[in-house]
Structure formats: C-alpha cells, structure tokens
Amino acid sequence: MNFFGSKSRDKVQSTTLFGNVRKINFPMLVRVLGWLLMIEGIFMFVPILTSLIYSESDVMAFIIAAGITLVTGAVMTFCIRPSHTQMAKREGFLLTALVWVVFSFFGMIPYIICEHPLSVTDAFFETMSGFTTTGCSIYESVDVLSHGINIWRCLTQWLGGMGIILFTLAVIPMLNYSGGMQMFNAEVTGITHEKLRPRISQTAKSLWTIYFVLTTLLILLLWAGPMDIFDSICHSLSTVSTGGFSTKNSSIGFWDSNYIKCVVTLFMFLGGVNFSLIYKAYHGDWRSLLRNDTFMAYIGILVVMYVIFVISIAVTGHATSIEAVTIDPIFQIITTITSTGLTADNFENWGPLVLSLSFCLMFFGACAGSTSGGAKIDRLLYLLKNTNNELYRSVHPNSIRSVRINGNVMAPEVVDKVIAFLCIYVMVIAVGGIMLTAMGLPFMDAFFSSFSCVSNTGLGAGVTGYGGGGYEIIPDFGKWVLSILMLIGRLEIFTVLILFTQAFWKK
C-alpha cells in the first residue's frame, strides 16, 4: 500500500510499510539514460565504418544495433518531460549503476546477430567485460572475428576505462547542475575526488582530453612498429584503458617485438597513474607527482617486484636472455598491477613465488583515479598506516595518532570507510567463489574467477593450471554472477551494493 505525503518541486515522499520513502526522479533518470544511449549509438558507427572498409557482412549487425540504440535513446530523451531536472545523491548512485547495465544490454546486440553469434548470456558477459575493462572473454579464438567485432570489443573498453558517466558529463554540460557531482563521485575510482576545474563538466573534459591524447600517441607509436593501423588502434584502445582485449589469440606475443612490449608497458604504466596527477604534470606541476604518497608507493612496489621477479626467473632457469630479465618481467608486473591482462610470455613457468605475488598485485591494483582495477594502492596505504597506529596504541593506549596521506590528516570516517571497503571487497570475492562452487566449478577455478572479475583483471579461469580452460567452461548462471561481480568491482562496491540497502530508499 502507498499513502502519499507532501509533494514539492524538488522531491516527493511517500509513506509505505517501510516508513517514509523518498521518491526517485525516474523521469529525469530515463531522460539521461536516453542521452547516454544515443551516445552509445553514435559510437557504433566506428565498427560500421570499419566493417565497410574491410567489406564484412557484420556491417548489418552494427547498423541494426545502432538503429535500435539510437531510436530507443531518442524516444527516452524527447518523449519524456520530467517535471523538474534536479537529481540528488540517490539519483546519482542509481543512474551510475543503471547506465553500465543498460549500455551492456544494448552493446551486446552486435554479438548476438553477427557472423559468429553468441548466446544472450555470453554476449552480455562479453560486453560487461568490455565496459568494465575486465578483459575476460568468451571467445575461444579472436583471430576468426571480423574487424568490426574486434574494434567494438576494444572500443567498449576504451569507453569504460575513463568512465561512461564521465564522458557524458564532458559532452552534456547541463548535468553540471543536475546531479553531476554525485555521478562523478559514484563512478570515478578512489577514496576522495579532486576537482581539477571549477565545474564538473570542465574536470571531465580535462580528464578525457588527457585520455584521448595518450590514446592517439600510442596509436602512432605502435603503427610506427610492426603493427598495422587496425591492430594499433585496437591495442591502443585496450592498453590505455587497461582493459586487455587483443585482436590476436596470443595477444602482444604475436608480434614477438621488444619495441611493442616497451611501448605498451609505458602506456600501461601511465594507465595505472591517477589521471589528475598526469593532468597536473602536463601543466608543469611535476612536484605533485613526487609529493604524492600513492604514486611513490606505486613506483616502489614496481621496483621491489621487479627485483623479486628477476631472482625467481634466475632460480627457475629462465634467465636465458637479456629480455628475459629486463623487458619480460617489467611487462608482466605492470600488466598485472594495472589489471590490463595483456600477455607476452608464459609467466607461470617463473615459479610459484611469481604467481603468488601476481595475486597480490591483482588484489590492490594501481592508483585510484586511474583506469586500473583492484582495491587500489591508496587503500593499501590507509590500511598499513592505520595498522601501524593501532599497533602503537596497543603499547601506548593513551596516544592520539592520525593517518596522514600526502601530509594531510585523514578524517577518521574516511579511514573507517577504507577498512569497511577492504572487508566487503574480500567478502564479495568469497561469496562469488562460493556461488560458483555450488555450480560445480573446482574450488581454485571458482574463487580465482571471482577474484579476477571483482578486481577487473580478467585472467582466465584456468590460468593457475587447475582448470585448464577459460570462461567458456562456466555455466550460464555463473556468467551472470561474474558479470555482476565485474560491475561491483568497476564501481568499487558501494555504488552497487548501496542500492540494496533500506537506508538508500528511506528518507
């Protein structure tokens, strides 16, 4: 039963069995989703043009998909007239979670009707993997896919890398006045968020400009090597976004080029850096990099891991060349910590120590505010510094110590949120693993698949050598579970899980 209470211009409340419930501005949410769908439909013209250039039959699949997406978006945008355009924090969270799901439902249409069609389950899994930059794939072979499908796979990662909402804020300035800050905070990774410019739309444009420039530069550098222009574009889209989709089954290893490895490694590294710091460095503020605790920890972790990897490679007898102890370990460390997932060598042969350290790199990932996945190094610093304070207080119970990051004292509630995040992060991985074991998956494959999807790394279910297969071996229901885990990991847990709490819906 519903009993309506007071109604104002900005909000409506209703009384239900659960108490006072704030009415969400659904008309405005639907209208914004319509704008977003039209943007997605426009991006589908990229694979349409690609398929036309290579004279592929998949062009019709993308024309149909683009038509459905554009028409649906136009109807939602122009046929709905909300009574007011204001969106508060709740609308921001709800819209951010919804748009990734809606984008995936429309983005999967080409996979269903293309020359090598997928089932609805597999198509949704592939699309969600792309948009969340997880990089796990249903396809056993990508070599047989058309150029249009391959570039769409990589384009979904590029769009999702910097963020769908962030792109919308950049091209639709009016959202700056209608819940823009809430959507920005809900989508951008990290603990705290910094506005580079006075308006959110200006900040979004600045970040996307850096993102676009890096992508363009990488395309030119890869094209200057042994890659052709198509492979250069695809791998640039999936590298800067730290997504990891490739046009070849053997990934970067297909070209067997140290030049490509070095260039890709550099841009994966940049993809793992907070883009706000890159923006500041671009404008001459290099001190922000050197004074940033997270960035320096990022560099320190890479150095320590490199030394350990080289020792392990030497001990296991794989130090057979200069590249084996220089380029290969650096490439593998950075592709893992940034959750890119590109492969160039069989690192499983480097010993169990390398594998265990790789799991640690996958768990924490790179810097917040980057395109990488994982829990983020920022939270690792909070955890270590707070743990050190608690150990000190065990000996000196009357002492007052604070967590300091970049010279600033962090509020206790921020530290509490970080600790809660890490605990829930582990719980989500555990719940996902348990659900997959209930479907008959081996223990190690189930928990590794859950871990890989939550951390948005995307390494295959059999990467540890236990299952001997990829994500195609997982039952359909398991793929839906993993798709949800990918979304939870990309939006950093709270944005999704908060929708299932009573506090979100109550006043």
Image: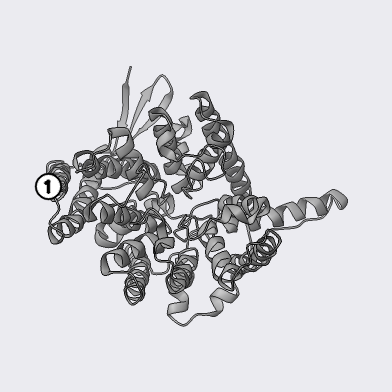
Quadrant in which the C terminus is drawn: top left
| Residue that badge 1 annotates | 60
Most extreme residue toward the right is 395
Q: Which amino acid, by three-letter code, is at mark 1? A: Met
Against 405, residue 64 (above or below) is above
Against 174, residue 483 (above or below) is above
Which image quadrant for residue 168?
A: bottom left
Q: Position of residue 364 (x, y in %)?
A: 58, 53
Is any part of residue 170 visible from this angle? yes
Against 483, residue 146 (above or below) is below
Q: For mark 1, does the 10 Å Cα neighbourhood hold few (<14), some (14 to 19), or many (20 or more) residues?
A: some
Left or right: residue 216 versus residue 254 is left
Against 308, residue 97 (above or below) is above
- Tell me the residue at 39%/69% (across/down): 197
Nearest to the observer: residue 46 or residue 445: 445
Q: Position of residue 191 (x, y in %)?
A: 53, 55
- Tell me the residue at 46%/75% (across/down): 280
